[in-house]
Image (cartoon, rainbow, N blue to C red):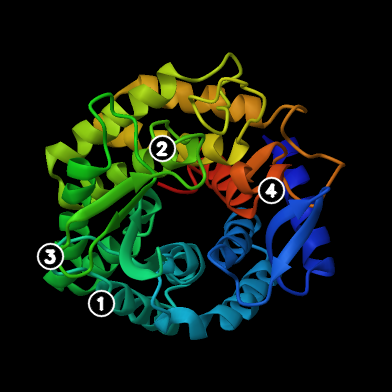
């Protein structure tokens, strides 16, 4: 473990020196960056917080504050990605430091997210265009943005946050999860009636297939929904989603980008990292050791020279896949993959729940 942590810290230290904007995905091993953090900037800040937690070195704390400062203006953005942006950056920072200002900014982001609820469909959503007309869109990824709302409820006792997160989770069970417990990526619906127009994928192999990262978001998201709501339907769902994921893993426990891609040529290490962290949480909540055992097998693979970018490239985990249909971040490092990999390792170390 110490050797792995040394590699992680070496990568982060080099990125601290070289980065001017938020890392997103690599291209030929080198970070491409975004000035505003896109939907992924929170993971870089979160990675700095994790390094602070591991080392107790205040330089990581100071850097996390500095990078978080660049994100704070986005707490009023009308995007369902506010959980990705503000949970690993501001909520995690608040938990580690007790800094009330970080907590206030986190609550601002949660308040904004709580306004993005469609009254008829009951989904947390954004507006997009279909054939030139405005429609509502929600995606499976939202399940891992809801922790911002679950946290806000626990912090304030305000039931609005609970109700929104709970209802979206129930609606996700109803509309996103197939009988096989594979997941759908995207739902578009009519803004006036709330009626569903179509169920599609934008990042998976085809509309009827199962995009592995979406499945990983769902496993982790439902585990966290159960952690706060204590509704057994969420625990059952998380376990069934996890079983589907596990049953479709290849020999090295790192999934292909889509479980139904017949070529089986492109892995997504970020899906593995997300799932490993989610499975560790699920194991604790369900008291089922097998989920921890699979998480450990995933992490063993990710820690091998096949996936751990010891000397090559700017990121920590090789062989991630951001958006294969668009040809973006295919067989590259992805900042969220790095974050969840380190998060999972810290759970194994007993540094995180």
- Which residue: 72% across, 45% down? 316
Q: Indicate which disc residue 115 carries.
A: 1
Please tell me whether mark 1 sits on a helix, a strand or a loop. loop
Q: Is residue 166 visible?
A: yes
Mark 4–mark 1 contact, CB under 8 Å?
Answer: no
Say which of marks 1 and 2 sits in front: 2
Upstream in sequence: badge 1 or badge 3: 1
Upstream in sequence: badge 3 or badge 2: 3
Please tell me whether mark 3 sits on a helix, a strand or a loop. loop
Q: Nearer the viewer, residue 68 or 212?
A: 212
Relative placement, left or right, of 50 versus 246 is right
Which residue carries the number 2 mark?
207
Upstream in sequence: badge 4 or badge 1: 1
> Tag 2: Cα neighbours inside 10 Å, few (<14), some, or many (≥20)?
some
Q: Indicate which disc residue 345 carries.
A: none
Relative placement, left or right, of 74 versus 289 is right
Q: CA distance from mark 1 to mark 3?
A: 14 Å
Upstream in sequence: badge 2 or badge 4: 2
Say which of marks 3 and 4 sits in front: 3
Say which of marks 1 and 3 sits in front: 3
- Which residue: 42% across, 74% down? 98
Which residue carries the number 4 mark?
329
The answer to which quarter of the image holds residue 174 is top left
């Amino acid at each position: 473990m110490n050797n792995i942590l040394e590699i992680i810290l070496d990568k982060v230290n080099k990125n601290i020196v070289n980065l001017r904007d938020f890392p997103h995905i690599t291209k030929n091993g080198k970070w491409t960056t975004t000035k505003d953090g896109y939907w992924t900037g929170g993971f870089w800040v979160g990675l700095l917080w994790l390094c602070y937690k591991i080392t107790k070195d205040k330089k990581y704390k100071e850097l996390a504050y500095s990078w978080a400062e660049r994100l704070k203006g986005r707490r009023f953005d009308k995007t369902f990605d506010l959980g990705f942006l503000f949970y690993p950056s501001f909520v995690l920072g608040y938990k580690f430091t007790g800094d009330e200002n970080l907590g206030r900014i986190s609550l601002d982001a949660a308040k904004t997210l709580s306004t993005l609820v469609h009254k008829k469909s009951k989904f947390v959503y954004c507006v997009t265009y279909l054939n030139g007309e405005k429609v509502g869109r929600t995606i499976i990824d939202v399940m891992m943005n809801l922790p911002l709302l679950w946290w806000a409820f626990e912090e304030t006792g305000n039931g609005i946050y609970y109700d929104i997160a709970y209802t979206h989770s129930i609606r996700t069970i109803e509309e996103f999860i197939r009988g096989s417990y594979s997941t759908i990526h995207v739902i578009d619906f009519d803004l006036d009636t709330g009626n569903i127009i179509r169920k599609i994928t934008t990042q998976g192999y085809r509309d009827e297939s199962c995009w592995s990262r979406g499945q990983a978001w769902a496993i982790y998201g439902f585990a966290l929904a159960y952690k706060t709501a204590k509704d057994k339907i969420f625990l059952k769902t998380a376990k069934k989603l996890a079983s589907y994921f596990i049953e479709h893993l290849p020999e090295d426990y790192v999934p292909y980008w889509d479980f139904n891609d017949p070529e089986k040529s492109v892995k997504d290490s970020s899906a593995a990292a997300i799932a490993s962290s989610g499975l560790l949480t699920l194991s604790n909540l369900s008291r089922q050791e097998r989920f921890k055992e699979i998480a450990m097998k995933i992490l063993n693979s990710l820690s091998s020279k096949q996936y751990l970018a010891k000397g090559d490239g700017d990121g920590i985990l090789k062989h991630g896949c951001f958006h294969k249909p668009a040809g973006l971040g295919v067989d590259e490092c992805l900042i969220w993959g790095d974050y969840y990999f380190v998060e999972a390792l810290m759970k194994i170390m007993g540094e995180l729940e």
